[in-house]
Each structure stands twice: as structure tokens, then as C-alpha cells.
Image (tube, grey):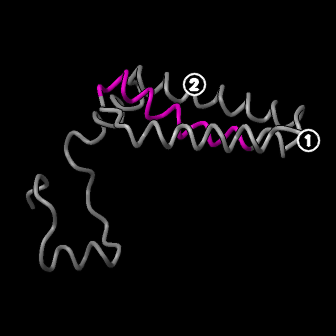
Amino acid sequence: MDWTKPPTGMTRLWALNGAQYPIRPGLSNWIVSTITNPLLILALAVYGVATLLWIFSLRNVPLSLAYPFVALAFVFVPVMAHFALSEPLKAKTFYGFILILAGVTISVIEF
């Protein structure tokens, strides 16, 4: 069987029925190189720290005050993508930013 091509015909049918295939050559090397990738390790560390900060925030700040700030991700992600990946920021994106920031501001202000 050629492991470089996706399964077709009867092979695909066997795959859908849960047939066991031997590990593809080079797959273990790919797994090891992926797990030891410094960027992946950094990303998981950042995710872990962000999760701990979120839990800390939820313990010390009322949910009605903390949760609206989740919407700020819709502002930060496009901005970071612009700087890190050179993705374009369009005018409608900035209009969306204004609406999100206004919504967060209104939801956390106490009258």
C-alpha cells in the first residue's frame, strides 16, 4: 500500500470500519519533532499562563465584570495578526473594534 496517498475504494471502506493500519514510515519522527517544537512549547506555556490568570481573575473579580473582557479577544487577535502575519486591517474591522469597545465599556460601567 502506498502511504503517501489517501485511501481509496475498499481501503477507505476498511478505514471507516476501524481497520488497523501500521504506523506510516516517518510518523514517529514527525510526532517527536512536533512535540519538541520550541514554538509549540512556547504556545502551550502562554496558554497555560493565560488560563491561570483567567482563573485568578475569576476568583477575585465578579463574573459580571470579568467576562465582558473576553470580547476584547476580537480586538486583540486581528491586531496581533496584522503585526505578526501582515494581515490587512480594513475600515470595517475598526468599526467593529469601536462597537466591541463600546459594548465592553457599557457593560462594565456601574450606574
Residue 13 rendering spot, x and y as whole percentages: 23, 79
Magenta stretch contains residue 60: no
Side (left or right) of 61 relative to 107: right
Residue 30, located in which quarter of the rendered image?
Answer: top left
Q: In the image, 66: left or right of 92?
A: right
Examine the rendered structure and indicate whether residue 12 appears above or below residue 100: below
- The stretch of residues the image draws in magenta is 68-86
Can you identify the residue that label 1 sits on? 111
Q: Amino acid at mark 2?
A: Ala
How many angstroms separate mark 2 from mark 1 (CA)? Answer: 39 Å
Q: Nearer the viewer, mark 2 or mark 1?
A: 1
Residue 88: give x, y in percent of width and height: 30, 32
Q: Helix or strand or loop: what does disc 2 sit on? A: helix
- Residue 10 placement, left or right of 85: left
The answer to if 78 sits in the magenta stretch is yes
Q: Which residue is mark 2?
A: 45
At 66% across and 25% down in the image, what residue appears? 49
Residue nearer the viewer, 50 or 21: 50
Q: Quadrant of the N terminus?
A: bottom left
Question: Image quadrant of residue 15?
Answer: bottom left
Q: Secondary structure at mark 1?
A: loop
Q: Is residue 13 above or below residue 93?
A: below
